[in-house]
Amino acid sequence: MTVFEQVREAIDMRTVAEGYGLHIDRAGMCLCPFHTEKTPSAKIYPKNLYCFGCGTSADIISFTQRMFNLEKPIDAVKKLNEDFGLHIVVGEAPTTAEVSEYRKRIEARRAYEQWEKQAWKTLHDYLWLMRE
């Protein structure tokens, strides 16, 4: 597993975009940071950003690279690693134990996100039941 794959699996686009100052509404729309606009035209998806105004499409790494005018994608990986505390060792191949521990953390985070999503759905359904 490369460091690029590790970063893409470790963090989602919304977290990166919000972490770097974009204000995302409930529909996942925000002002595109790559051109001037008054109304949101960029859509944040789990793994990438797409702007309907300028046509920009960027994953987590290319978004960071473009936001901070970094020369190489590996520089964006290093910045993401530092800024979001991903604990990814850049420059050397991870050991089997590190990969398995990394995958466990990712799986635990995904399980929590699923649980949280289900909890919000349950609360939402209960609210509507109470309103009736």
Image (tube, helix red, strand yellow):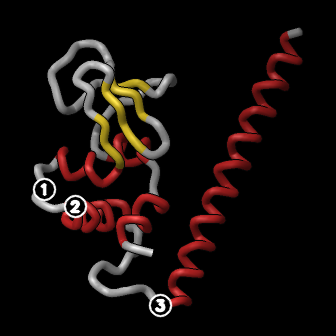
Label 3 environment density (alpha carbons within 10 Å; few <14, some 14–19, many ≥20): few
Alpha-carbon span between mark 3 and mark 2: 23 Å
Residue at x 49% of width, y 60% of height: 9
Q: Secondary structure at mark 3?
A: loop
Using the image, determine if residue 77 lies above or below residue 122.
below
Using the image, determine if residue 44 lies above or below residue 64.
above
Q: What's the residue type where badge 3 is placed? A: Thr
Left of 41 or right of it: where is 125?
right
Task: Give me the disc on residue 95.
Answer: 3
Residue 131: x percent and y percent?
A: 84, 11
Q: What's the residue type where badge 2 is placed? A: Pro
Q: Secondary structure at mark 1?
A: loop
Q: What's the residue type where badge 1 is placed? A: Leu
Which residue is farthest top? 132
User: Are the two marked residues, 3 and 1, in contact with CB atoms closer than 8 angstroms?
Assistant: no
Using the image, determine if residue 47 lies above or below residue 100.
above
Left of 126 or right of it: where is 113?
left
Image quarter for residue 24?
A: top left
Alpha-carbon span between mark 1 and mark 2: 7 Å
Residue 7: x percent and y percent?
A: 40, 63
Residue wearing tag 2: 73
Q: Secondary structure at mark 2?
A: helix
User: Are the two marked residues, 1 and 2, in contact with CB atoms closer than 8 angstroms?
Assistant: yes
Residue wearing tag 1: 70
Alpha-carbon span between mark 3 and mark 1: 29 Å
Residue at x 19% of width, y 65% of height: 75
Label 1 environment density (alpha carbons within 10 Å; few <14, some 14–19, many ≥20): some
